[in-house]
Image: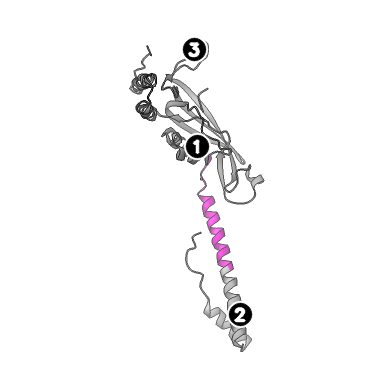
Amino acid sequence: MPIRECRILGQIGSRPRTWSGKLATVGVFNDGCLLSLILSAFAATATCCLGFCTLTVAQSMQAHLQSPKQVVETYRRMDANGERLTTSGWKKGNAFFLHPGLPPRERVIGVMAGEIIGEATVNGDKAEVWTEFDFLGKVYPTGRLSRALGGSPPVRGPVPSSSKYRLVLVDQHSNSGPKEEAGEGVSRWKIEDFASASMVTVDVAIRYLERLRDKSDSQSVKKNADQSIRELTALQKGRPREAP
């Protein structure tokens, strides 16, 4: 099997007509009593308005909650574009996972093409989303591209493949578990199983190999990278090229 995130509209204003009406019915107050009444009425109005604002913002955020499919689409877009190959991008990608992890010391990159994100199957606070793609191979830190997928007889990429993403609905402010365990609040879908390796497009893999080749002092790495670039370019053009 391949490798596998209150603006208050309007104003909190006074209501002079209502207050003046109340004052007229209760009679004459001294200055201190009048000020106390006005401040109390203002505080009650402000509290009501702020409560309404908080409720409105929460409802708005819930309305814009990404669906499980949208979460996977957003994650796969950033990962396929190679964003997780950088330190800042890795941290950004961690936000999609229920249990984020550290980047690997020895980075192995999956290479794929033609990815399609399927529809989500939702059951309460759990969901599953399948993706389909052609798995081409893996790029190693040595610059070598391996298209061998094992099996008997051995299989070489590209190979039609699929991957399952399991998601859980959790409170936005907690990674502790499902929504009912995390408490009330604005929720979002998170991917349960952490992906320790990136799965990128052919273009991204070629650019990665070019940088690896140009920065390396090893002639072996440079040679491997050049060979891998030629092979990926041929695959991209639809002409699989056997490695010598």
User: Residue at 66% of width from left, 45% of height from top?
Assistant: 181
Amino acid type, label 3 = Pro
Look at the numbered disc 2 and give the secondary structure of its residue.
Answer: helix
N-term mark: 3 or 2: 2
Q: Secondary structure at mark 3?
A: loop
Q: Which residue is more in the foreground, 58 or 207?
A: 207
**For this rendering, which residue is in front, 166 or 145?**
145
Closer to us: 49 or 144:
144
Q: Secondary structure at mark 1?
A: helix
Residue to which mark 3 is pinned: 154
Residue placed at 51% from the left, 15% from the top? 150
Disc 1 residue type?
Val
**Residue 157 placement: quadrant:** top left
User: Image quadrant for the C terminus?
Assistant: top left
Residue at 51 percent across and 73 percent down: it is 13
Residue 72: mark in rendering: 1
Verify CB contact (< 8 Å) between mark 3 and mark 1: no
Q: Give the residue pinned by disc 2.
A: 37
